[in-house]
């Protein structure tokens, strides 16, 4: 009773947003803040939080600078494109682009790409909120290039392609390539905006994961503007990045919506330092990519270590660690996980969540499953310590 009271008091007086050990089987868990930052990025972030920064001061001239400059430099080196601009999330990136480039005019979007993202936000609503008139093109399962051509008129300003990153369509389906849409847009003098979302910058198939469409692929296909997230497969902080045509980027940057979506100093530091890891060949220091690349043998060793500490019957089995974060529904990499037997798996999962440290697990088939692919070695030992010290098993 005394221990429980002390733990409750610590929860009341401690930080309201607790750190969590992610053993859920999802790498980019939206509820846990998506991408975990690299250690070097976290250190740079702590320094930025504690002190003042030359965020918008040119230290050479003493005049006002541009907070976008350091990010623009790194994006150019790592991703390419004529120019770039960063706002606080990917939905804001799409909103700002359409507000600046298509407000009062028509925007074409395939019916098969009218996605809903987290929090019940829907792409058609984002388009309409930007002041554009949405024109639905094609059918849910089949949209051809000719459908876009028929929908065009002098009021058409933008073609939007929104990648179906959080669901799949298979079977009797068809859609034009990004290159075809880019060529059509250029032939009509309008903008082609491609929302990649995931922010993938590397060939993920090298890790045994599906090969996701990269930001560089969209630029190579000819998109005028590419939008993507910073906190998904890119492995950085929450941010919305716009990359592409320099003239169009300048128009977006000057629009009032860009000021309303401005990133703060912490995002500037975290994103630029994350991109620096790509530029210097150290991208595997990013936990998101490190977890994808971690060998199955290493994960199996973690699983066996955890299973040996449990005071109940366990099962060790292979499974899939999902990518999460809206990056390929149900897709992921092979893993080895531990299933804890329980009379009441809901109660056991709750006790692990509310313990110290907090451990987020998954319930399947009346077992509580711990997936160690997303745990650091010291976190594996922390889980072992929790299981060894557990006095009552639900």
Image (cartoon, rainbow, N blue to C red):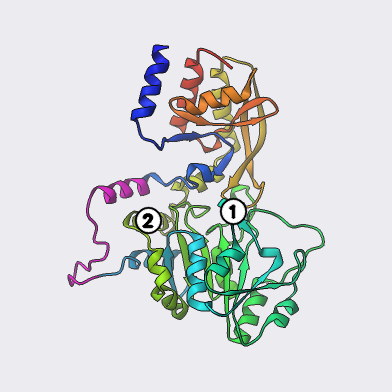
Q: Position of residue 303 (x, y in %)?
A: 58, 28
Q: Is residue 379 left or right of residue 216?
A: left
Q: Residue at x 36, y 34 (%)?
A: 15
Quarter of the image for the N terminus: give it.
Answer: top left
Picture coordinates of residue 241 (x, y %)? 46, 64
Can you give x and y, in whole percent of width and height, for residue 133 in the image? 60, 75
Residue 46 drawn above or below residue 392: below
**Magenta span of residues:** 40-64
Secondary-structure class at tag 2:
helix
Name the residue at the right extreme: 172
Q: Nearer the viewer, mark 1 or mark 2?
A: 1
**Residue under the image location 22 percent in, 69 percent down:** 58
- State the image coordinates of residue 328 (x, y, percent, origin top left): 64, 52
Q: How many tags in the picture?
A: 2
CA neighbours of label 1 inside 10 A, class few (<14), some (14 to 19), many (20+): few
Q: CA distance from mark 1 to mark 2?
A: 25 Å
Q: Can the viewer see residue 79 in this picture?
A: no
Tell me the residue that label 1 is attached to: 120
Q: Which mark is residue 267?
A: 2
Q: Is residue 151 visible in the rendered structure shown here? A: yes
Is 55 rendered above or below residue 347? below
Q: Would you say 198 lies left or right of 259 here?
A: right
Q: Earlier in the sequence, mark 1 or mark 2?
A: 1
């Amino acid at each position: 009773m005394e221990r429980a009271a002390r733990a409750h008091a610590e929860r009341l007086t401690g930080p309201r947003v607790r750190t969590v050990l992610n053993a859920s089987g999802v790498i980019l868990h939206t509820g846990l803040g998506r991408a975990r930052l690299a250690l070097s990025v976290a250190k740079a972030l702590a320094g930025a939080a504690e002190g003042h920064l030359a965020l918008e001061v040119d230290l050479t001239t003493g005049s006002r600078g541009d907070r976008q400059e350091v990010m623009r430099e790194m994006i150019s080196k790592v991703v390419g494109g004529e120019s770039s601009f960063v706002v606080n999330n990917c939905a804001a990136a799409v909103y700002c682009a359409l507000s600046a480039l298509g407000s009062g005019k028509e925007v074409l979007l395939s019916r098969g790409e009218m996605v809903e993202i987290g929090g019940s936000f829907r792409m058609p609503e984002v388009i309409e909120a930007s002041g554009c008139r949405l024109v639905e093109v094609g059918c849910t399962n089949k949209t051809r290039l000719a459908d876009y051509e028929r929908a065009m008129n002098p009021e058409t300003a933008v073609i939007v392609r929104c990648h179906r990153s959080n669901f799949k369509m298979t079977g009797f389906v068809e859609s034009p390539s990004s290159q075809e849409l880019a060529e059509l847009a250029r032939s009509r003098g309008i903008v082609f905006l491609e929302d990649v979302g995931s922010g993938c910058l590397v060939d993920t198939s090298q890790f045994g994961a599906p090969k996701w469409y990269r930001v560089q692929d969209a630029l190579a296909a000819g998109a005028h503007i590419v939008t993507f997230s910073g906190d998904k497969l890119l492995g950085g902080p929450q941010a919305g990045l716009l990359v592409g045509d320099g003239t169009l980027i300048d128009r977006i940057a000057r629009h009032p919506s860009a000021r309303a979506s401005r990133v703060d100093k912490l995002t500037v530091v975290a994103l630029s330092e994350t991109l620096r890891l790509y530029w210097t060949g150290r991208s595997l220091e990013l936990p998101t990519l490190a977890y994808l690349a971690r060998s199955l043998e290493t994960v199996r060793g973690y699983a066996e270590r955890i299973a040996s500490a449990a005071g109940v019957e366990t099962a060790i089995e292979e499974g899939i660690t999902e990518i999460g974060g809206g990056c390929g529904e149900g897709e992921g990499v092979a893993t080895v996980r531990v299933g804890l037997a329980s009379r009441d798996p809901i109660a056991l999962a709750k006790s692990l969540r509310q313990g110290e440290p907090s451990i987020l697990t998954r319930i399947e088939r009346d077992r509580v499953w711990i997936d160690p692919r997303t745990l650091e070695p010291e976190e594996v030992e922390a889980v072992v310590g929790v299981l060894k010290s557990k006095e009552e098993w639900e």
